[in-house]
Image: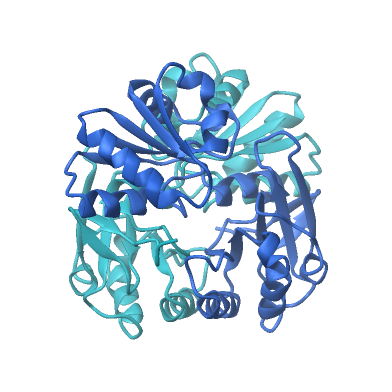
Chain colours: A blue, B cyan
Amino acid sequence: MISIIGIGPGEKAQITPLAIEALKNSEVVAGYTLYIDIIKDLIEGKEIIATPMMQEVERCRMAALAAKGNKNVAMVSSGDAGIYGMAALMIEICEELGIREEIRVIAGITAASSAAAVLGAPLTHDFAVISLSNLLTKWEDIEKRLDLASQAGFVIVIYNPSSKKRADFLKKACEIVMRNISGDTMCGYVRNIGREGQTHKILPLKELKDEVVDMFTTVIIGNSTTRVINGKLVTPRGYRI
Amino acid sequence: MISIIGIGPGEKAQITPLAIEALKNSEVVAGYTLYIDIIKDLIEGKEIIATPMMQEVERCRMAALAAKGNKNVAMVSSGDAGIYGMAALMIEICEELGIREEIRVIAGITAASSAAAVLGAPLTHDFAVISLSNLLTKWEDIEKRLDLASQAGFVIVIYNPSSKKRADFLKKACEIVMRNISGDTMCGYVRNIGREGQTHKILPLKELKDEVVDMFTTVIIGNSTTRVINGKLVTPRGYRI
């Protein structure tokens, strides 16, 4: 059995009992070093497959092969393992290796939910989730999605807004959506959600453009109805019933 | 203090410890009758404000007024309280009533995450979340969003795909996206996620169009890369690093 588990934003109180049980029942736990560290007291004494970032394929291979040896394997991702997480890659690699162990995905709180909760309630209506990482998606596709999502009036949640190599990607993204929506549109971001040093900020799009953010930041760009109520970022539910 | 709490898809093992703690610390619990029932053993002996569906505004007013009386109030929503949930309305109503109690939103597992986990891993890349309910959004806006989201190559998660009054809305939605994407695009849906009688189905868009679904169903429409691997709906991560 292979369980692909989302451990939520980072604090233990946001890991579901289902995920905790699956971790406890596993014999081997695989994951990115940072995430393994968050759950270390839940997995004491278990065999650990921890590899640094960028070694996702190798990590999945090692985990899949461990499962083939009849071990109960847990593969952990932060947030939800199914949203920009390891679930799809794990399923693909099991297929490639001819491993037919049962695979189950255990959902976790994704950053769209946890960032929205910190900021207030910006996701009450339709929204789009876009990663600015061009490692696995072409930048032209990302650009097209930002453009069409802002034309459509979606609130836009941005994952991976920046990294050392992509320092100006959030600026570029803001410039694209500002073709379609006002620079006064209210936005917000949360850094280190659920972890030590969590910070957040609510600000208009025209100021967001020049903010310095990092890869541990989740950004939410509002739509034309999003506003600040009592210090919180809110997209009202629309007309009242 | 007012806590607006997402209780996840329906099974208790998917409610986070943070949400359980907030429920236990509350004196008054407000919610739609069906959700109150799911958590009844967690809130024994507490004052309950349960109102039927469609009385959201009144339920929020009652909860807000209870908080003004210095009580610890919990407002519950299924899934994530911030995604098509009660969080925004609660913040708006507190503002209208001049209630300045602290409000915090506690995220839960939203149906996009839980449905994706049941089906496999369809949300590995950018996606859009659209509700087909035209109670709070104009149908023209919904139609525009379906059209642009499918042009953009988003996987599309559909909440509230149908109801008695809107029996043909999923069919209409499928017809709109089929202007932009192939009828062979792989899709799936999950009914009664995390609850008794959970069922799911994976099928091409051209067949999804004619399925009968209800308001307890979450639908996921794939993009051009989505495929079925070993019985699971998967949107691969893209080219390998």
- Left or right: where does residue B92 sit relative to residue B196? right
Q: Nearer the viewer, residue A123 or A156?
A: A156
> Which residue occupies 25% across, 58% down?
B213
Tell me, yes or no, if residue A130 can be seen here.
yes
A182 vs B118: above or below: below
The spot of residue A36 in percent (x, y) is 51, 32
Provide residue A197's location: percent of width, then percent of height: 76, 37
| Residue A225 appears in the picture as rendered | no
- Quadrant containing the C terminus of chain A is bottom right
Q: Is residue B121 left or right of residue A202?
A: left
Count of labels in the image: 0
Is A49 in front, or is B94?
A: A49
Q: In this rendering, is residue B157 above or below A64?
A: below
In percent of the image, x 19 and y 70: which residue is there?
A: B210
- Residue A157, given in percent of the width and then of the height, sits at 60, 60
Q: Which image quadrant for residue A72?
A: top left
Instruction: Give the percent coordinates (x, y) of residue A49.
Output: 42, 34
For image coordinates 60% across by 65% down, the residue present is A156
Pick the residue in front: A223 or A13. Answer: A13
Q: In the picture provided, is A189 more to the left or to the right than B240? A: right
Q: Quadrant of residue A189?
A: bottom right
Image quadrant containing the N terminus of chain A: top left
Residue found at x 58% / y 78%: A143
Q: Which quadrant would residue A147 be assigned to in this image?
A: bottom right
Camera-side residue: A236 or A83? A83
Determine the residue located farthest toward the top in the rendered image: B45
